Image (cartoon, grey):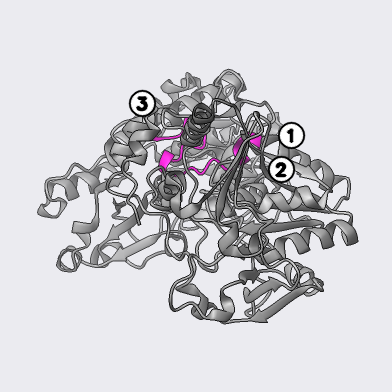
Amino acid sequence: MFVGLISDVGGKDAHKEAALWALGRALREKGVLSVILREPAYSGNVSEFLAGQMAVLSHEREVLRRYGVFDQLSGFAGVEEASCRSFEDSVWAGGKKVPVYDRALFLLPQLRYHGISQKPETEEKYIFVDVSAMTDEIARVIGELAKQRGISSVVLVRYGEGDNRMLFEGTGLTLLDGISGEDTKGYVGALWMSAGVVTDRYVGVSLALIHEKPFLAVKTSIAEDGQIRALLEFFNLVEHIYNSGEKIGDCFEIPDQDSLHKGLRALRDKEGGRVAGELLFEDANMLVKCPVKIPLSQCSACGACEAVCAENAIHMEADEYGFLHPVVTESLCTDCGSCSEVCIKRGQRQLVQFPDESYPRFYLAQSKERSGAAYSGIFGQMVRYLIKERDAIVFGGILDEELRPVVIYTQDADMAERFAEKRYLVNDTRQAFRKVKEFLDADRFVVYTGSACECAGLRGYLKRHYPKLFLCELLCHETISNKAFGMYVDMLSRRKDSKLKNIRFGDFSAGTKAESAVLYTEYENGENGRVKFSKSRYMQMIEQQLAVNEACANCSYLGKKRVGDITLADFQKNTDDLPRAWADACVAVVSTAKGGRVLRQLEEAQVTPVEFDSLLRHLYKKTAAMPNERPAMLKLLQAGDLAGIFKNVTKK
């Protein structure tokens, strides 16, 4: 989905650019891309900031219309009344409303602005001053504020050729290097690092509130006075407005930080709900119910937000279809922003930064002794080597005694080998992620194995590089509803009139891959069963993606986008054109020097370099598909009718 952001930014303007960036970033975090529409005849050159942060189309409207740009946009929006109304009244809007988000800055928490902030070099305490209509009186007031608080320096925002330095003569203040009103990164960074803010600009007041800075809103004759008053009335802070001739009291400081926190969260929720309703979604139920506020369709339930929350305010909860999503307990949430910081859908921080152009490296790999095991025996060899040589603690997914998917850790190689079994389920990772960090902080060597989104979640949670963490990513294609799996377990138990105590997706004690492609079941009454994947309606349901998690259709980890030190992948299927020599091998993708060193140490492994393009058509190279039957399947899932879903399995 694409949304057009209407802009009439003339030249470069930090105020307008910051607001446009905030709106575009908030849309991106909801899974929607935005593009800024500008007309170069009126807007001048595109600023370096906008060009580096967002997509900008600088062409006349006729050109945009001719190339079908408007047809691709699902909506329009902007941050200024005049430009939005002008666009809405023109034929180019196509009759669509163009909402104005003049409070777009409040769509994001403070932490998000740190990424676009350029800090000033000074170490001195200073007052940040952004006043377009500077007078002798205002300079005097700033001098009084600074003297009361033991501050001797000021950073001024400069506009054009004007220079207000002479107005500060006699105030006793040192004027540090100023910030250009065209420098968005410098503007945000200087305000962030200041000891307080004095401004007559709406954006200045907004960013002062977001950064929780002491501030004074100077009342001048500019048109933004009404906006500023309405905003401060929302926060019950109108006493921060300074009128000519008034005495300076204590109105500079924020009297109640807790009230400010609540107000910021309330305004963010209000504006976020408005964006969701007007531009994106039919209702707020299409967003996860935790502060990250990403679409349900984007959330893979990796667990990073749940694990990082120091207040344990976030927990994973299944929806009516059995898909897990984070939910916040509002009374426990402190609005610290940690969950948003680690969310794997808020950028690509978790992707491996390849050491040089020779990475990633692709290999065909198989064990000389254990070729029938998971991933052609390579995974088993790898964990055995790391346990023996590095005293590694290995983490991975398994089914607990109640057949719930969890992550455990072990130094038993036989147990660790089971982590490579495919289960197509989302694991409970919170305690595991925290335990990984505990071991790493104790200088232990840790191996974590899991899907790409799970490994990315761990990277996000840890926030920094650990030399003794080894990530083994297992290439997957989809996860399914945990509810569907639970219903299947109940179905099997009823059939045997005995509780199912174990289920394994592949019997790797068999000698070949074909023999291991079976669903193996054990019951409390001693019975067991084996059925080929091709004969199992449950496995065919997975293969035909009838109960797939929608987040898998929005996978961020395809092709060469990797998060593990090493990635293991089986071929999609034994197609007729798959080279015979590859039939019993797996693919090993080495993304780091650490991954390469480990692969080279596997003495029983037969490893052959291969070009990525020759592998691609035999691997999953697209995201999971959303079959046309999915809406009907969701209704059956909601009703608990697994047999009804099985009836839709196409026999092959």
Pointer 3 local density, CA inside 10 Å: few below 14, some 14–19, many at least 20: few
Label 1 vs label 3, nearer the camera: 3
In this figure, which residue is indicated by the disc labeled 3?
A: 639
Residue under circle 2?
125
Relative image position of residue 349 (x, y in whole percent): 60, 56
Q: Position of residue 289 (x, y in %)?
A: 47, 29
As drawn, 363 above or below 594: below
Q: Is residue 345 visible?
A: yes
Q: How many marks?
A: 3
In this view of the protein, which residue sits in the foreground, 562 or 43?
A: 562
Magenta segment, prevailing SS (helix, strand or loop): loop
Q: Amino acid at mark 1?
A: Gly
10 Å crowding of disc 2: few (<14), some (14-19), many (20+) = some
At label 1, counting other C-alpha atoms closer than 10 Å, the crowd grade (few under 14, some 14-19, many 20 or more) is: few
The reply to whether callout 1 and callout 2 are in contact (CB within 8 Å) is yes
Asked if marks 1 and 3 touch (Cβ < 8 Å), the reply is no
- The amino acid type of the residue labelled 2 equals Lys
First in sequence: mark 1 or mark 3?
1
Ranked by sequence position, the earlier of labels 1 and 2 is: 2
Is 147 located above or below residue 543 in the figure? Answer: above
Residue shown at 76% from the left, 50% from the top: 416
Residue 489 image offset from top left, x and y in percent: 53, 33
Would residue 100 be visible to someone looking at this image?
A: no
Q: Is 288 in the magenta?
A: yes
Q: Is residue 283 magenta?
A: no
Kindly report the distance in space between the C-alpha atoms of the residues bearing marks 1 and 2.
Answer: 9 Å
Q: Which mark is residue 150?
A: 1
Task: Give the magenta range.
Answer: 286-308
Q: CA distance from mark 2 to mark 3?
A: 62 Å
Of the pair 226 and 245, the residue shown nearer to us: 226
